């Protein structure tokens, strides 16, 4: 796939059509000056990387650096390797239950993290593993959680959809339920008076949940510093966006809230859009919508083969022409920042790191019997007892 | 064969109860799935004759293309699992009622549990269609549709996802008739949802939320135990003039297999079924635990050597009356209290947590009506008062051993 993408000739990508759509290629950013190895340089995104609703679009000129791009490359690879490891563990029946993978959507999670600060807040739905790692977690912690082990980020008691860090509010299993929660987090940020942005993420499927609109209304009403991020991977479970949404321009669905639509396959465009929206909400302009047009390669969850409602050719085409990792690889090689061998080495490092984390996680024990009674109520406020199997097993706090 | 399998499994668990907790080694699921007793259950009607003679069955051949209502001769059955029986019921409902529609998340291509497989092709995409991921919207939409006289058969993909729709169901659907003074009703609304534990569903895919709806007068809640039951009860639910929540035990979708009559038939709502008559203890349950209870009854009369010291010889001949409640709201007070008046002992088994569970409501009513007849306190065997924990799910739900223990305690009180 990589080689296919690289040898593709430079064809003019923009077609002269009446209404210009969003560009969703992963590799259309051009150099505007020579790439430096030691200092930042400027590149220019494709003209159609963004669309705006009730607002201007972010600047197409983006300052990047070699270290940053290589770092993104490695992180995206790490995320993909981690998800692939989860996939393999699931198929070995070591991970049970419900598991949703983000393979194909790496540019969104890694690009988002590149555009925000550690103080900013992120809350997302169940496709949450990369965010959990990027927001201060570890691969071992995520894999451990999936395996239901003590080293898991929720001590093995939550599983795939229930992973949290200090600035990452989960991992939420109910479609759309996290969006009003995100609005609440943003209210708390506004109240604190600090320039903190909250990214409340949901999918194209969840965008039809009533409570999402309830959250929009509250956020605009109170001008909350909240970025509502619609990660549009084109399918809400097994139903395509066109079949489920009367308006598939998700960035325009905020009523009075402005919106940006961005290419979610080009990580440089993702980062630029995130910075733009972060500046927007932290400068007191109220909420903004941000739609990333992206694609998931796998099924909705592990029990969905992902090929009953879309063609294999479609998936194959996305993989071969719009893959976010291959796109970034192409920039790095074409701009002379690193060779294919260097990148392969990074890729290999990522694989080793994930393999190592998987082994460590597997070695961790499952939760102890006593953990069953913990965290049902806040410590010290629990009821006198919770019932157990036998009279002797009733747990007294 | 049946009891041997059960006892082997039980023995394994009993010998080293802590093994699973302490082991970090990967362990495959048991070969027969997590509910090995279903496949060999004597409660399943695996012959044509037994299926056609299901208790309370009534044939609804209004169209005269089958034999007259009470005749069994000439009727046929087909081997179906529970999801196929559910599909069969919906197919009949769609065929006989032009106003009937089926909708929900991903139902147009079969749904996650395959219950609507092929219905869209058979009846058209105008009548079997996908909705957005909007539980609140699905319930509200179904209420609107039903209030216009349509037969609305909605699917909530998992019973765990019903909570966004709680307001619509409890405040709109249940109260529609009452608050419009009888002018409007949504009696033709049926909301189907897969319920109960699947062995590894965890917090959001293994709950049993029937208890939350107990106070919503105006609603009916139905939980079938088998394919024959599912088809008859679902057809009754669809045609019942009250909104019904029809909860299908998801682990039984594939594991419970029966000969199911292919004709249109009803099974009565609001009526419990006595599965095995008895005189010493009433064992009341519904859905998946029916099979755990069946296994527990076998263990009581014929305990394997390792269990034998815990089962006093004096109670091994006890006659257990096993009852499937089937309709949770409104529940069959008569059948249950008549049984308890006869046996003097009651054990209630359900998967939902004990606190706030349906068992509490039943126990309260039974003690009021049967107080002087009771020989022992009403005993409840239920899920623990924790969220359904992923890693402990097998231990969270009541299994045969816990039911056995409760029966011993109640019989020796």
Image (spheres, helix red, strand yellow):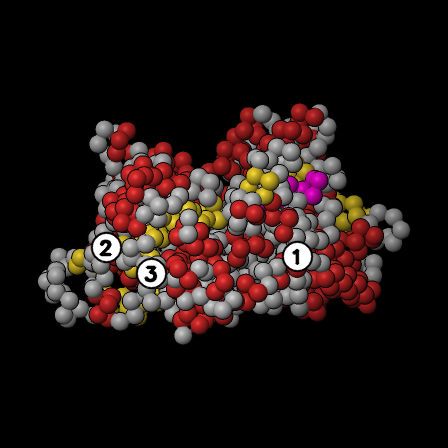
Left or right: B280, with A22 as reference point? left
Residue at numbered disc 3: B226
Q: Residue at x 68, y 38 (%)?
A: A121
Please state the chain letter of the residue tagged with numbered disc 2 in the rendered image.
B
Q: Quadrant of residue A251?
A: top right
Is disc 1 surrounded by few (<14), some (14 to 19) or many (20+) residues within 10 Å? many
Q: Residue at x 57, y 30 (%)?
A: A219
Magenta stretch prevailing secondary structure = loop
Residue at numbered disc 1: A366
Specify whether residue A245 is in view. no
The answer as to whether the residues below labels 1 and 3 share one chain is no
What label does residue A24 carry, if any?
none
Please state the chain letter of the residue tagged with numbered disc 3 in the rendered image.
B
> In which quadrant will I find the N terminus of chain A?
bottom right
What label does residue B267 carry, if any?
2
SS of the residue under disc 2: loop
Magenta span of residues: A165-173
């Amino acid at each position: 796939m990589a080689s296919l993408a690289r040898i593709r000739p430079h064809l003019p990508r923009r077609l002269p059509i009446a209404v210009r759509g969003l560009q969703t290629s992963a590799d259309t950013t051009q150099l505007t000056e020579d790439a430096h190895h030691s200092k930042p340089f400027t590149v220019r995104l494709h003209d159609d990387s963004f669309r705006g609703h009730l607002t201007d679009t972010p600047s197409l000129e983006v300052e990047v650096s070699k270290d940053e791009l290589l770092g993104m490359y490695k992180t995206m690879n790490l995320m993909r390797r981690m998800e692939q490891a989860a996939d393999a563990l699931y198929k070995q029946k070591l991970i049970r239950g419900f598991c949703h993978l983000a393979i194909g959507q790496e540019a969104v999670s890694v690009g988002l993290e590149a555009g925000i600060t550690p103080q900013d807040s992120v809350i997302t739905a169940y496709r949450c593993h990369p965010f959990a790692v990027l927001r201060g977690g570890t691969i071992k912690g995520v894999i451990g959680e999936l395996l239901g082990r003590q080293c898991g980020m929720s001590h093995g008691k939550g599983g795939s959809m229930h992973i949290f860090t200090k600035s990452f509010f989960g991992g939420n299993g109910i479609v759309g339920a996290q969006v009003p929660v995100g609005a609440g987090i943003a209210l708390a940020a506004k109240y604190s008076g600090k320039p903190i942005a909250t990214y409340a993420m949901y999918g194209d499927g969840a965008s039809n949940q009533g409570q999402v609109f309830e959250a929009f209304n509250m956020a605009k009403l109170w001008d909350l510093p909240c970025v509502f991020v619609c990660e549009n991977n084109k399918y809400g479970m097994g139903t395509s966006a066109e079949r489920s949404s009367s308006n598939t321009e998700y960035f325009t669905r905020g009523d009075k809230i402005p919106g940006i639509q961005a290419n979610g396959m080009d990580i440089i465009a993702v980062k630029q859009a995130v910075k733009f929206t972060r500046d927007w909400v932290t400068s007191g302009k109220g909420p903004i919508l941000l739609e990333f047009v992206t694609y998931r390669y796998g099924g909705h969850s592990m029990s969905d083969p992902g090929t009953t409602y879309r063609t294999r050719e479609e998936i194959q085409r996305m993989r071969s022409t719009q893959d976010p990792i291959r796109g970034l690889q192409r920039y790095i090689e074409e701009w002379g920042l690193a060779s294919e061998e260097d990148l392969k080495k990074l890729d290999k490092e990522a694989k080793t790191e994930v393999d190592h984390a998987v082994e460590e996680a597997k070695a961790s024990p499952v939760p102890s019997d006593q953990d069953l009674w913990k965290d049902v109520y806040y410590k010290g406020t629990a009821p006198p007892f919770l019932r157990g199997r036998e009279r002797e097993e009733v747990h007294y706090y | 064969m049946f009891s041997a399998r059960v006892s082997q499994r039980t023995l394994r668990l009993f010998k080293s109860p802590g093994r699973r907790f302490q082991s970090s080694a990967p362990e495959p699921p048991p070969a027969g799935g997590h509910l090995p007793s279903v496949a060999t259950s004597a409660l399943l009607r695996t012959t044509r004759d037994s299926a056609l003679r299901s208790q309370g069955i009534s044939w609804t051949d209004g169209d005269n293309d089958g034999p007259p209502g009470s005749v069994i001769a000439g009727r046929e059955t087909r081997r179906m699992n529970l999801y196929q029986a559910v599909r069969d019921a919906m197919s009949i409902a769609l065929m006989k009622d032009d106003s009937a529609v089926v909708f929900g998340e991903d139902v147009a291509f079969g749904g996650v549990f395959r219950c609507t497989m092929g219905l869209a092709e058979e009846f058209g995409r105008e009548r079997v269609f996908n909705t957005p991921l909007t539980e609140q919207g699905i319930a509200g939409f179904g209420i609107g549709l039903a209030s216009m006289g349509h037969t609305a058969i909605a699917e909530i993909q998992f019973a765990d996802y019903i909570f966004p729709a709680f307001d619509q169901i409890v405040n709109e659907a249940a109260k529609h008739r009452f608050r419009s003074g009888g002018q409007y009703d949504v009696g033709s609304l049926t909301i189907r949802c897969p319920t109960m534990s699947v062995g590894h569903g965890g917090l959001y895919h293994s709950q049993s939320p029937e208890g939350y709806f107990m106070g919503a007068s105006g609603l009916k809640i139905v939980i079938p135990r088998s394919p024959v039951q599912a088809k008859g009860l679902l057809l009754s639910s669809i045609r019942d003039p009250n909104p019904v929540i029809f909860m299908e035990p998801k682990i039984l979708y594939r594991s419970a297999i029966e000969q199911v009559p292919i004709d249109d038939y009803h099974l009565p709502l609001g009526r419990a079924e006595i599965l095995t008559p008895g005189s010493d203890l009433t064992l009341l349950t519904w859905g998946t635990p029916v099979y755990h209870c069946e296994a527990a009854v076998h263990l009581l009369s014929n305990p394997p050597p390792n269990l034998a010291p815990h089962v006093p010889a004096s109670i091994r001949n006890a006659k257990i009356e096993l009852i499937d409640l089937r309709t949770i709201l409104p529940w069959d007070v008569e059948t249950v209290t008549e049984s308890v008046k006869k046996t003097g002992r009651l054990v209630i088994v359900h998967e939902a947590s004990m606190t706030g569970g349906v068992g509490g409501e039943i126990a309260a009513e039974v003690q009021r009506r049967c107080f002087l007849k009771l020989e022992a306190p009403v005993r409840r065997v239920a899920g623990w008062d924790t969220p359904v924990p992923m890693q402990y799910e097998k231990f969270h739900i009541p299994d045969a051993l816990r039911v056995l223990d409760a029966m011993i305690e109640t019989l020796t009180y």
